[in-house]
Image (cartoon, rainbow, N blue to C red):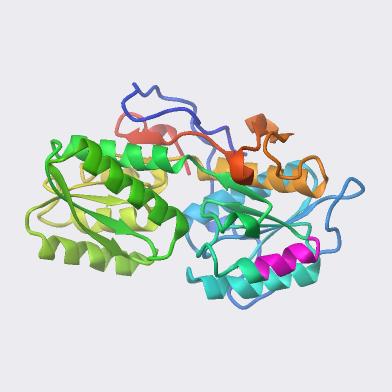
């Protein structure tokens, strides 16, 4: 079981240790779905007369972040008596997600919960699925609003951008060169955050220079190699921000055994289980994230509310999300999970995801 994750902590506020999120066995999260395979046909699309069938389609399988969010979704679906499936490609690309959307529509699932690899490339397939009666909920990374019924936003783009800028500028003394190690070049959420980080840096940190945005494609080895390349290209580099869980862990692994450890600061978005050893050995001072298990959990309850007709996605709609409580739909058919949380040596032992 998962416990409710922190939703209101921001950088700069004194952090108080909270109850640990319950243990999550990352290796056991994927119930089904491998690249090129299809789940068993769903027979209960949903509605008040039966359990709601919900299919989760992350950017890619084998990613610890999505293992965690999908497990949160599974927990919620089991709570409301629905049917859960997890499918997806092994690589994070828009074209690789399309066949899984088409299969879900053919199977007549009640709802499809998608983290989009591109804001536009999935729209035709999603429109076809919606035309077949499938409710589409995006989470983590959105499509264009007209291509889905609801977006579950992990935190505001402004909040995510600001917490990362605050962390890196404090760690480097608010001056010097920094770089960003992102996921793929067309990732909706990454690009929105980076644009706002640039705005925040220009407005409030004139002595900090962003020298490059590099792309590790949410691949561990590529991100590791990009980290090495950044450090070789910019010998005066003082910090790296990686707003992707794969990237920050790969960059930390590189720094931890290099001469740059303790000299080049690293922050961004990561999970406690990935980053614990690097915080404990001094490679990383602090990083941020929301609770991805709660994100998947909320997305599943939103999907149920849509399928059952409790909400339509209109601004002001309200629904219950189990242990997380009540939520209200905001502008552009979006629902906000909460604010980013900062993890550091004082509190990281309190979390397990």
Judging depth in this view, the residue of 116 and 312 nearest the camera is 312
Write the residue at 49% across / 32% down: 20
Write the residue at 73% across / 69% down: 128
Tell which residue pokes out farthest to the left in this image.
236
Q: How many marks?
A: 0
Quadrant that contains the N terminus: top right
Judging depth in this view, the residue of 267 and 28 nearest the camera is 267
**Is residue 277 visible in the rendered structure shown here?**
no
Write the residue at 66% across / 70% down: 125
Please provide percent x and percent y for residue 64: 47, 55
Magenta range: 125-133
Please provide percent x and percent y for residue 254: 22, 59
Judging depth in this view, the residue of 112 and 256 nearest the camera is 112
Residue 305, image quadrant: top right
Please provide percent x and percent y for residue 138: 60, 54
Secondary structure mostly seen in the magenta stretch? helix
Indicate whether residue 234 is drawn in magenta: no
Q: In the image, is 254 to the left or to the right of 287?
A: left
Please provide percent x and percent y for residue 43: 86, 63
């Amino acid at each position: 079981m998962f416990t409710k994750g922190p939703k209101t902590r921001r950088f700069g506020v004194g952090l108080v240790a909270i109850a640990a999120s319950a243990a999550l066995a990352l290796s056991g999260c994927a119930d089904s779905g491998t690249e090129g395979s299809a789940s068993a046909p769903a027979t209960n699309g949903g509605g008040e007369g039966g359990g709601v069938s919900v299919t989760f389609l992350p950017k890619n399988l084998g990613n610890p972040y999505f293992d965690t969010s999908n497990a949160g979704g599974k927990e919620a679906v089991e709570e409301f008596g629905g049917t859960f499936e997890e499918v997806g490609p092994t690589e994070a690309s828009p074209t690789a997600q399309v066949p899984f959307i088409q299969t879900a529509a053919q199977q007549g699932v009640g709802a499809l919960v998608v983290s989009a690899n591109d804001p536009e490339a999935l729209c035709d397939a999603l429109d076809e699925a919606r035309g077949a009666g499938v409710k589409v909920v995006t989470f983590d990374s959105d499509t264009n609003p007209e291509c889905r019924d609801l977006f579950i936003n992990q935190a505001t783009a402004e909040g995510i951008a600001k917490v990362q800028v605050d962390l890196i500028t404090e760690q480097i003394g608010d001056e010097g060169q920094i770089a960003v190690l992102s996921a793929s070049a067309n990732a909706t959420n990454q690009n929105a955050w980076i644009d706002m980080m640039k705005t925040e840096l220009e407005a409030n940190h004139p002595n900090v220079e962003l020298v490059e945005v590099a792309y590790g494609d949410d691949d561990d080895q590529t991100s590791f190699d990009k980290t090495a390349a950044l450090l070789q290209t910019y010998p005066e580099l003082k910090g790296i921000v990686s707003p992707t869980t794969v990237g920050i862990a790969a960059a930390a692994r590189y720094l931890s055994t290099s001469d740059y450890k303790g000299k080049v600061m690293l922050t961004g978005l990561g999970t406690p289980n990935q980053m614990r050893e690097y915080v404990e050995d001094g490679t990383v001072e602090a990083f941020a994230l929301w609770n991805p298990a709660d994100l998947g959990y909320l997305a599943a309850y939103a999907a149920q509310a849509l399928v059952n007709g409790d909400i339509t996605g209109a601004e002001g709609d309200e629904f219950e999300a189990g242990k997380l409580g009540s939520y209200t739909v905001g502008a552009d058919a979006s629902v906000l999970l909460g604010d980013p949380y900062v993890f550091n040596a004082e509190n990281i032992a309190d979390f397990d995801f």
